[in-house]
Image: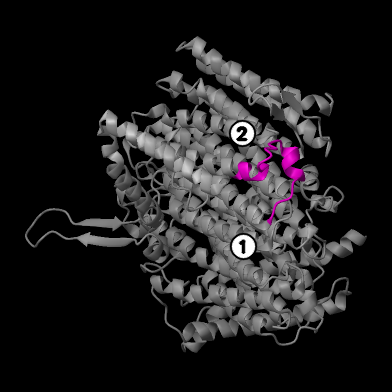
Amino acid sequence: MDVIVNLAPQAGQMLLVLLLAPLLTGFVRIVKARLLRRRGPPLLQPYRDLLRLLRKEAVLAENASWLFRCAPYLIFAGTWVAAALIPTFGTGLMFSWSADLIAITALLGSARFFLALAGMDVGTSFGGIGSSREVMIATFAEPAMIMIVFTLALIAGSTQLSTIAGFMLSGGVGLRVSLGLALVALTMVAIAENARIPIDNPATHLELTMVHEAMVLEYSGRHLAMIELSAMLKLLLYVSLIACVFTPWGLAPDGAGPIPHFIGIGAYFLKLAVAGTLLAIFETSIAKMRVFRVPEFLGAALMLGLLAALLRFMSRSF
Amino acid sequence: MMPPAMTLPIILFSVCGFLGLAVMAVALGSSRRATPVLYGGASIVSLVALIASLIQLVAGGHVTPGLTLPMGVPWIGVHFRLDALSSFFVAVIDLGAAVASLYAIGYGRHEHEPLRVLPFYPAFLAGMNLVVLAGDAFTFLVSWEFMSLSSWALVMAHHRDPGNIRAGYIYLLTASFGTLCLLLAFGLMAGPAGGYTFETIRTAHYSGWVAALVLALVLLGAGSKAGLVPLHVWLPLAHPAAPSHVSALMSGVMTKVAVYAFIRVVFDLLGEPSWWSSMVVLALGGVTAVLGVLYALIQQDIKRLLAYSTVENIGIIYIGLGLALAFQANGVTAGTALALTAVLLHVLNHSLFKSLLFFGAGAVLSATGERDMDRLGGLIHRMPVTAFTFLVGSVAISALPPLNGFVSEWMTFQAILLSPNLPQWGLKFMIPAVGALLALSAALAAACFVRGFGITFLGRPRAQAAAQARETDRFSQSAMLLLALLCLLAGILPGVVIDALAPVIQSLIGGRMPLQGNVPWLSIVPIAASRSSYNGLLVFLFIAASAWIAALAIHRFASHAVRRSAAWDCGYPDPSPLTQYSAGSFSQPIRRIYGATIFEARERIEMPAPGDTGPARFRVDLKDLVWDWLYAPIAGIVNFTAGRLNHLQFLTIRRYLSLVFVALIVLLLVLAIWM
């Protein structure tokens, strides 16, 4: 009985992130379309796209290897496991101790590793260009993320995400310079990691500056569905991460009853809506940058993260 | 089960076994049987030593009585001893040796001149074992030199290949320099009384400047063998020049013997460190990690890429050592234990995956005759086992969960997070900066191995040799599969390894990490469960289950139809495999961003004159600044001095005699003034 009670938030969380991920993407697309005075696709269009892709046959290039066929599932699994460990509506996740924030960052790194390899498998120039640029972006984004983790861990005294969220929720934190720097850096990393404007444009094909879409160009059918779903999950993951650390209000504490959990779910929907709207506004108000500007953007994130961590090393009061 | 007291004699007998095999190799000559017999023998002998050292390690802090043999310098003798630290390193050496010998049973058949390899290979194994068994400075130095020279002979095995002579020459110079530094360090520690046994050295106390000088000399001596920047220049030349199983041993194991030397002197013999020494080690480690992997990212030769990646991993190990020194200087035992455990774990992990990767590179080399990645490609179809194991090694070395490389880096990060409590301001600045360098090197390593695996094994073959490659032999395959399995096991059950390391840490610093065996679900908890924990097993199971469930559900309920067709490539696929991304083009963004300052990378496009039908050319110029700024001036000075002294060779006998006379007078004068 105890196990079921403990397991319920964890299982609920896994299903919730899986079900909500396409909704968030659809929501961002709608808001973006409205901001551009278009009607845009229906809110549920991403679900329809995924189902349609799942039912289609997969067309493989003649020289595609087993890695090309396995990679979508591995990428999906890595992203899903990472997303399942980030508190969305409650901090009482049963398996939150199995991977801390460093491990979650590295799990996303594993997913990216296989995505970049899959881009190179068929041996086309587009796949190569995508992989090459993706790993270049990662060489900035990952250290920046680790610096942010350092900052959060030094504030909360733990790298466990549930503990960090619980600490932020307890209210004794207040406004801190290092937290502000970390928030800015994390937002920049999240934009880059999710291939959003100004780093990459998720809505284009056939553009020489594209990164993510170039890697998955050879995918079709169920494989493409898995990769699209992973990308949606990753967007949800970063929004949840920012939300649970910087706006932990409404999170149900560990061992709370069903009612706080329902409040938590309501608050989570609200946070997603706000984050999606902000993202859409940001994306419509900025132009895409060329690829060799990306290091400057992410270098700034890395420096902000390092500065935040240094401040925490210097003094406890920042 | 044999009693722990027997382990030292058994390991020494194994060393004699190695030496016997070396003699046998000469006796067998170029017989066809020699290769399998000798490598099989070496494999068995190292397995015996491995088991003995594991028994010693499991028996805990039980120190076996040392052995003194009446050889060598008369008043010192030859001392051997086996404590927990030595037995851990014997285990690492002989695990690597056993697997490399298994691999070589198959791989060695491709050798054109086996007599250039076979006698030196067991001698090299014996040398490495003797270094970690040595119980006095004299034995240590002789074994160290024996190890260096036998590996030099192996580097020179293919001396007719272009560049290998130079590699061997530079290796010999650096090795001599390293031994000289260690000789001076031990001389300083032994003092004028000449107490050369480790027991005597350990009990002695050193004044500040002696300790500082010893530390600097050991950093130079052990660092030059390990490949610490800027002493790394020989490593990417020498390691790839040797046959691949020897490259694996040199990169995966011999660099660890150098780490052993550093740990033995600094943590065991020298006594309490001062905090500023950790600053030096941390800075060197951070620079080595990032520079090593950046160099690796611009290599086209797969074995040189792996060699530079060894430099990076040595950097990671020295970062951990620097952290341990910082904690120890401030008396934070929990931190020291965590950082040192991370170091030893990474020593083991790196020996596993680097050997695996060199085996893979060797299999590719023997199947295609190519080391240049730009002439490979598509090997995943023709060499499935090699490709799979190389992929496992690549994921592990990129520090990605759930494999083993991640665990040691994670523990290093946890040690960094413990350090804000250290009082020194220098450390407060240095440690977060080094943490950023460590994170940067991990991300760059992932990029490096996406490139290494992707260009070599994925895509379409870029040359005929790659298109006709055949899978390697059974022995090599089983060696690679074994190492891949060990990488996975060490990744998902790190608690077992950490507990096995506890006696080593206990004997070195008198403290240890918390017992991991009691933690539920086989998690690892470095300090306290509320602080941080990681469970490789669960992460692995979660990923496997999610991927499997997703694949099963989709194949069952949605679609499992597959159609093969031409590649899409936005509608314009090019039939020539040369239009794929190459090793050079893949690293172009990183080369531009990081390399513009570090390598002074310059890209030039040479267009033909209008009307000229010649091709346009794209050239990249890279400079090795370490070489240009440090080694080229030294070589210049040596050359200049040698040129100036040259005419001393052509004097008359009268002048020689007067030269001798003057020298004698000067020396006597110096002596008189000194006294």
Using residue A251 as the reference point, say whether residue A227 is left or right of it. left
Q: Residues within 10 Å of mark 1 (few under 14, many from 20)?
A: many
Position of B171 relative to B320 (above/below): above
Q: Residue furthest left?
A: B611
Quadrant of the snapshot with the C terminus of chain A? bottom right
Position of A306 relative to B631 (above/below): below
Q: Amino acid at mark 2?
A: Gly
Counting from the top left corner in percent of width and height, residue B441 is at: 54, 58
Chain letter for mark 1: B
Position of A32 relative to B125 (above/below): below
What residue lies at 36% left-to-right and 60% top-to-bottom? B570
Q: Quadrant of residue B598?
A: bottom left
Q: Nearer the viewer, residue A261 or B456?
A: B456
Using residue B467 as the reference point, say whether residue B259 is left or right of it. right
What residue lies at 37% left-to-right and 69% top-to-bottom? A207
Q: Amino acid at mark 1?
A: Met
Quadrant of the snapshot with the N terminus of chain A? bottom right
Q: Nearer the viewer, residue A180 or B502?
A: B502
Counting from the top left corner in percent of width and height, residue A204 is at: 42, 71
Dot 1: what SS? helix
| Callouts 2 and 1 close, C-beta under 8 Å | no
Q: Is residue B520 magenta?
A: no
Range shown magenta: B185-207
Q: Is residue B199 magenta?
A: yes
Question: Residue at label 2?
Answer: B96
Question: Residue at label 1?
Answer: B279
Using residue A264 as the reference point, say whether residue B561 is left or right of it. left
What residue lies at 38% left-to-right and 74% top-to-bottom? A290
Q: Residues within 10 Å of mark 2 (few under 14, many from 20)?
A: many
